[in-house]
Image (tube, rainbow, N blue to C red):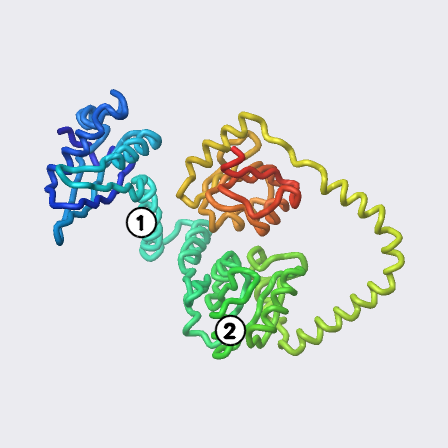
Amino acid sequence: MAKISPVSAKYIINSTIFIDGVVDRPDVIGAVFGQTEGLLGADLELRELQRSGRIGRIEVNVDTSSGKTKGTIIIPSSLDKAETAIVGAALEIIQRIGPCNAKIRVEKIEDVRISKRKFVIERAKELLKNLMDGVMPDSQELADEVAYSVRVMEVTEYGKDRLPAGPIVDESDELIIVEGRADVINLLKHGIKNSIALNGTSVPPTIGELSKKKVMTAFVDGDRGGNLIIKELMQTAEIDYVTRAPDGKEVEEITKKEIHKALRSKVTIEQAKLDMSTKDKESSNRQHQNRSYQQQRQRPQHTQQRSKEVSKPRSATNDEKKKFKTMLEDLVGTRGAYILDNKTNILGKVPYTELATTIRSLSSGVYAIVFDGNIDKELVAVAEKVNVRFLVAMDTKVKQAQTKIAMFTANDL
């Protein structure tokens, strides 16, 4: 039999086998070749595929116990995705091996290239860190770039909630609470290693437990969302101090000088409560004074708003839909995302978990996003800020009427 080179194998078919009786390994292999013969046509005949090197050596491992046999069948393939899936499905038609009833179930088809890419990424990180330890950079710009990469690698996952955090959370008596992973990275970039992220707008139990033991400073964005997070923290954790990024800015984007200025300007939680209470009263008074004026303007404004809401998103061309469908199929199971320009060329590929942060950093030039995941309100809000035209995903939690961005799911395509 021909043997496929491990280097050329693109996919591995992993399947399990259950047999009501005792059989040997050659019986299983014989059944695989014999019972699939002529089933798939001449182009996908297993014996011919193996002779030509497109299907590798079939590995069968069986174990017999109490008169029954179970084991695994592993088949390497250099065929394309569709052909490999057909060969895998053909295994499941085998119902008898020798005199015994049998059942074969394909558990998964593994893309060998994905595991290789993961290895390359992890090894590259390790090599880069070793280079930092042993090589003097040639310029300040290079030093800053490499130092930033190392800071990113220092982000850890803390506690049962696996919250993004700096490396000295346990050792430090004082902690800085920020909103997300990108905020932690920005603080690390500027040498602040005792931060921990909420990883969302709700406060996880880990933060509540830490707040009982350490001095906690909430460092939030300079917008309304920051105020909401402070109110949530006041109710669910023991916060000692509060500070904010400059108005209209996010913690993840501010400079070293702005970070240190904000931390020097922190106020006690009592003062923060008083300030928020005063602002709420002032806001209430202004609303009361302007109510009649607002009521007069409400009808024309409401009409304009409805006009905007009912405006339909831009429709995609047939060529664009075909490209979106091909890219989405290519991403199945990878948890990755393609970012496209207005000619539907791929600008880059990022993990789904880093998608929102990447979009914020680009600020413009993103025409469409295709990703292996679900469209949610948070992603839509970020995409609208940078004028994304299309979101293409496996499924969506957002209705089309709620956004001006055109959305497509796997079923739509």
Marks 2/1: CA distance? 36 Å
Task: Say if residue 125 shows up in the picture.
Answer: yes
Left or right: 78 as drawn, with respect to 236: left
Q: Residue placed at 21% from the left, 44% from the top? A: 17
Residue occupying image coordinates x 72% and y 73%? 277
Residue toward you, 401 or 366 = 401
Identity of the amino acid at label 2?
Gly
- Between circles 2 and 1, the one closer to the viewer is 2
Q: Position of residue 306 (x, y in %)?
A: 76, 43
User: Image height check: is 369 above or below 131?
Assistant: above
Say if 247 sits above or below 7 in the image.
below
Point out the image quarter for the N terminus.
top left
Residue carrying label 2: 208
Which mark, by number, is residue 123? 1
Q: What residue is shown at x 52% (from left), y 64% (from top)?
A: 198
Q: Which mark is residue 363?
A: none
**Element class at badge 1:** helix
Residue flagged by tag 1: what amino acid is it? Arg
In terms of depth relative to the viewer, which is nearer, 12 or 193? Answer: 12
> Considering only vertical position in the picture, is 235 above or below 395?
below
State the image quarter where residue 253 is shown: bottom right
Residue situated in front as seen by the camera: 128 or 183: 183
Q: Rate crowding at label 1 as few (under 14), some (14 to 19) or many (20 or more) other CA atoms within 10 Å.
A: few
**Crowdedness near tag 2: few (<14), some (14–19) or many (≥20) residues, C-alpha within 10 Å:** some
* Horizontal and vertical percent position of residue 274: 70, 76
